[in-house]
Image (cartoon, rainbow, N blue to C red):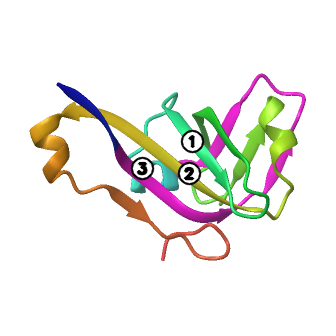
Amino acid sequence: MLVETFKSKIHRVKVTEAKLNYVGSITIDEALIEAADLFVNQRVQIVNVNNGERLETYVIPGKRGSGVICLNGPAARKVEVGDTVIIIAYGFMEEADARKYEPTVIFPDENNQLS
């Protein structure tokens, strides 16, 4: 049986932009995408620490080293620039693998940079 399991997380980054008139998605600094073991176009859950909103969208790459975290399209209505969000990815695994799996979690600094 396949089990949907917490795969990886970018813990507590600041929203740098919100672009309502965009097709949709979340733009994430490419360095953060790689460090968190995310994939371009992967579905992610966004949890807004400031207002409690939760939403799902997909990842698109932003400029490496820029610290960009930009909610695009309708998701832009769920955040304010400066809000703190947590970006969570899940994956499907065999039950035995899920019991042993160690998620990748990164903790960027206050400028959305890796230490």
Q: What is the distance, in whole Å, between disc 3 and disc 2 at their CAs? A: 13 Å
Q: What is the distance, in whole Å, between disc 1 and disc 2 at their CAs? A: 6 Å
- The tag earlier along the polypeptide, 1 or 3, is 3
The front one of 90 and 36 is 90
Chain part drawn in magenta: 6-30
Residue drawn at the location 82% of the way across and 64% of the way down:
82
Secondary structure that dominates the magenta span: strand
- The tag earlier along the polypeptide, 1 or 2, is 1
85 sits to left or right of 11: right
Q: How crowded is mark 2: few (under 14 residues within 10 Å), some or many (20 or more)?
A: many
Q: Are marks 1 and 3 in contact (CB under 8 Å)?
A: no
Q: Residues within 10 Å of mark 1 (few under 14, many from 20)?
A: some
Picture quarter containing residue 54?
Answer: top right
- Please determine whether, in this image, residue 49 is positioned above or below residue 91: below
Residue drawn at the location 43% of the way across and 36% of the way down:
39
The kind of residue on which mark 1 rests is Gln
Q: Secondary structure beneath disc 1?
A: strand
Q: Secondary structure beneath disc 3?
A: helix
How far from the left and from the top, in percent, is residue 3? 26, 33
How far from the left and from the top, in percent, is residue 48? 70, 55
User: Which disc number belongs to residue 34?
Assistant: 3
63 sits to left or right of 72: left
User: Which disc number belongs to residue 87?
Assistant: 2
Say whether residue 10 is magenta.
yes
Q: Secondary structure beneath disc 2?
A: strand
Say whether residue 28 is magenta.
yes
- The tag earlier along the polypeptide, 3 or 2, is 3
- Please determine whether, in this image, residue 104 is positioned above or below residue 97: below
Which residue is under mark 1? 45
The front one of 7 and 1 is 1
